[in-house]
């Protein structure tokens, strides 16, 4: 699916940013210690990069069910009730993300119009602030797909769950981890 490829690309960019930031940190420490020459604007670059790795992977994480969830009640529910609870939670998340997109975009627009910049290196902050509503828009699309999928399951609880994360029992999770560790050997 195309949406999945975009999510994976965003996640890859976030991972690359973390990797690059790690090397920048090493260069900062070595430059300061060995040559008494720290990287100018290092804190500003770290500040601006945080939006990249904090938000770009959020839609991918939603797709693979990587977020921390409190699903004790969901595990007790079966069939239509379970899917209706998931539908309600997804609809609420979609509403919240919609608000975050709107205010994130207005925050970006304000920074762009004012020419907002970091204090030390005077780097423009609007590109970093634009990442937030873009990443949330991708999350919004993922939640919309899941909302439709949960609505389908509410209507037909016996259908195969498609495009939604499936909760595994403790036994299924343990079995999967055993199989994955056996495959790595």
Image: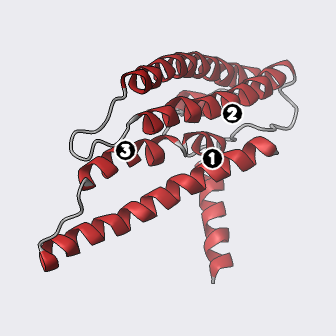
For marks 1 and 3 on the same chain, the one whose residue lies earlier in the sequence: 3
Q: Are marks 1 and 3 in contact (CB under 8 Å)?
A: no
Residue 165: image x %, image y %? 68, 40
Residue at 81% from the left image edge and 26% from the top image edge: 153
Q: CA distance from mark 1 to mark 3?
A: 40 Å
In the rendered image of this protein, does residue 64 appear above or below residue 154? below
Q: Which mark is drawn over residue 48?
A: 3
Q: CA distance from mark 3 to mark 2?
A: 25 Å
For marks 2 and 1 on the same chain, the one whose residue lies earlier in the sequence: 2
**Along the viewing direction, whichever of 16 and 107 lies nearer the viewer:** 107
For marks 3 and 2 on the same chain, the one whose residue lies earlier in the sequence: 3
Residue 91: image x %, image y %? 64, 17
**Along the viewing direction, whichever of 52 and 35 lies nearer the viewer:** 35
Q: Secondary structure at mark 1?
A: loop
In the rendered image of this protein, does residue 60 appear above or below residue 107? below
**Along the viewing direction, whichever of 126 and 147 lies nearer the viewer:** 126
Q: Quadrant of the N terminus?
A: top right
Q: Nearer the viewer, mark 2 or mark 1?
A: 2
Residue 172: image x %, image y %? 66, 54
Q: Secondary structure at mark 2?
A: helix
Identify the residue position indicated by label 2 in the image: 142
Is disc 1 surrounded by few (<14), some (14 to 19) or many (20+) residues within 10 Å? few
Identify the residue position indicated by label 1 in the image: 169
Q: Quadrant of the C terminus?
A: bottom right
Residue at 74% from the left image edge and 49% from the top image edge: 5
């Amino acid at each position: 699916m195309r949406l999945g490829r975009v999510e994976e690309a965003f996640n890859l960019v976030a991972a690359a940013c973390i990797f690059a930031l790690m090397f920048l940190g090493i260069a900062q420490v070595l430059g300061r210690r060995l040559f008494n020459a720290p990287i100018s604007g290092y804190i500003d670059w770290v500040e601006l990069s945080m939006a990249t790795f904090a938000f770009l992977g959020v839609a991918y994480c939603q797709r693979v069910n990587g977020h921390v969830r409190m699903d004790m009640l969901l595990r007790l529910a079966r069939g239509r009730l379970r899917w209706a609870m998931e539908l309600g939670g997804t609809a609420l998340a979609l509403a919240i993300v919609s608000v975050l997109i709107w205010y994130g975009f207005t925050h970006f627009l304000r920074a762009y119009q004012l020419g907002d910049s970091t204090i030390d290196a005077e780097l423009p902050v609007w590109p970093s602030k634009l990442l937030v509503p873009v990443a949330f828009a991708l999350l919004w699309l993922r939640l919309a797909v899941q909302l439709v999928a949960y609505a389908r399951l509410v209507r037909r609880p016996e259908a195969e769950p498609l495009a939604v994360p499936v909760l595994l029992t403790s036994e299924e999770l343990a079995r999967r981890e055993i199989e994955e560790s056996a495959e790595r050997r």
